[in-house]
Amino acid sequence: MGIAAGSFLALTFRFGATFLWAAIGVLTARALSVEDRGAYASAVVFTSAAGGITSLGAATGFFVANRKRLPADVAGNALLIALPMSLLAAAAGAAAWLLIPGEPGRFGFFAGLLLPPNIVRNTLNGVLLAEGKLVQFNLSANLPVGAGFLLLLAVLVGIGERSAVAALAAWTAAQYLGLLPLVIWGRRWWSWPLRHRPDGRLLRGMLSFTAVSGLAGAVGLLNYRIDLLLVVTLDSREGAGIYASAIAGAEALWLFSSAIAMASFARVGAESRAEAARITAAGVRHTLLIVTVGAGLLAAVAPWAMVLLFGSDYRAAALPLRILCIGTLLYAPQALLNNYFANQLGRPGIALALGLLSLVVSVVLGLALIPGLGFVGAAWATTASYLISGAAAISLFLWLAPVGTRDLWRLRRADLERYPALARELTRLVRRPGA
């Protein structure tokens, strides 16, 4: 399967996941108070950021795709690190429940329980992605979202337990159910430590890579959500609930770039530097074309979309959504560029530096703008941070990769011809089972 068809497949899964996330957003907006929804969303954001620090997914993907290590060896050794870390996280959650009274302790408990499935799933998904197993990767990544929606629906609507803690408990249970495919597909990975001795060199390499890439991932996740956390702190939980809806709409624009990055991950790591740069530059061109159109359309329908999806209480989310459309457009190529920096060059520190730059700008401007402008100030701060870090990423890519500036911006006839070619390839794929 080519990158174009793989991107379409990944995009299809991403659309499905986005639909589920939107359904979860609508469900929690309708079932929870605005304040409880803000608290629930903030807790999920925090655990995602913490999970990014401890995930070995980037390292397992790099050693399989770029260093050509056997998937079972990489996965088995990675589990020797991931499983003890998971147990420590769960123990920390239990300690929070016992030592911290009231709702904060319960939130800490579920935060600790949320980390183990995130650590294990992200670690093993890196192997699947590096092998080019896009169907398995996407099923593993998206099943927890579908299970989360069903359990949230059962708890919030079926049982009628409409609280932030109940919603977080349902989400936590779904993450464990989402591990079932990896238990089945990775039977040999789980049993590998029983049949082999640990590879000290590989373990040290993965730990070294993860020390940087994991921190970069955590900074990236925090960067995507620091504005929401600042709104909770400097504005209100109600403002956080409204702003979370604007974020959900704007980040839908990243579906296309993330799909291309996903489909090209294995080849960018395995090919020569020149070919990897060419693949990345082509992905940037297609991303900017699609996201520009999408951002314009989303900004135009923002007021109606927010009310239709979330209700009249979220009408105020339209303005920050329009501002965030600018920021997400500027930041759309970032996943593709980070893929080249880490998976081809083996330098995850570049993504970490860029993430820290964006985070610092977002925090400084957020502290300055949110007290006076509320969540609208957060949207402006985020957009400015994306502009600055996006410009830095493009400059670094042009410096390190054997491509020119026009390779990133100028559409070519071959680019436009890829779309009918993709349609023909997909038609062949659909017809093949019945041939």
Image (spheres, rainbow, N blue to C red):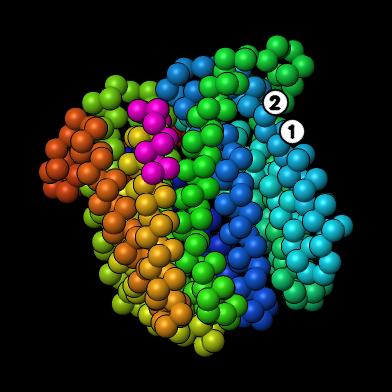
Q: Which residue is the site of mark 2? A: 80
Magenta span? 343-353
Q: Position of residue 169 (x, y in %)?
A: 76, 61
| Residue 350 within the segment the image draws in magenta | yes
Residue 225 in view, yes or no = yes
Give the CA separation, mark 1 to mark 2: 7 Å
Q: Say whether marks 1 and 2 touch (CB < 8 Å).
A: yes
Q: Position of residue 60 (x, y in %)?
A: 54, 28
Q: Residue at x 23, y 26 (%)?
A: 274
Q: Nearer the viewer, residue 382 or 284?
A: 382
Tell me the tag on residue 65: none
Residue 349 horizontal side relative to residue 27, left or right = left
Q: Which residue is the site of mark 1? A: 84
Are there few (<14), some (14-19), or many (20+) residues within 10 Å of tag 1? few
The rendered magenta stretch, by its main secondary structure, is classed as helix
Residue 296, picture quadrant: bottom left
Q: Amino acid at mark 2?
A: Leu
Q: Secondary structure at mark 1?
A: helix
Q: Amino acid at mark 1?
A: Pro
Q: Residue at x 61, y 18 (%)?
A: 73
Q: Position of residue 170 (x, y in %)?
A: 74, 61
Q: Nearer the viewer, residue 308 or 425?
A: 308
Q: Nearer the viewer, residue 355 or 283?
A: 355
Q: Quadrant of the C terminus?
A: top left
Q: Residue at x 41, y 82 (%)?
A: 373
Residue 378 in view, yes or no = no
Q: Nearer the viewer, residue 231 or 244?
A: 231
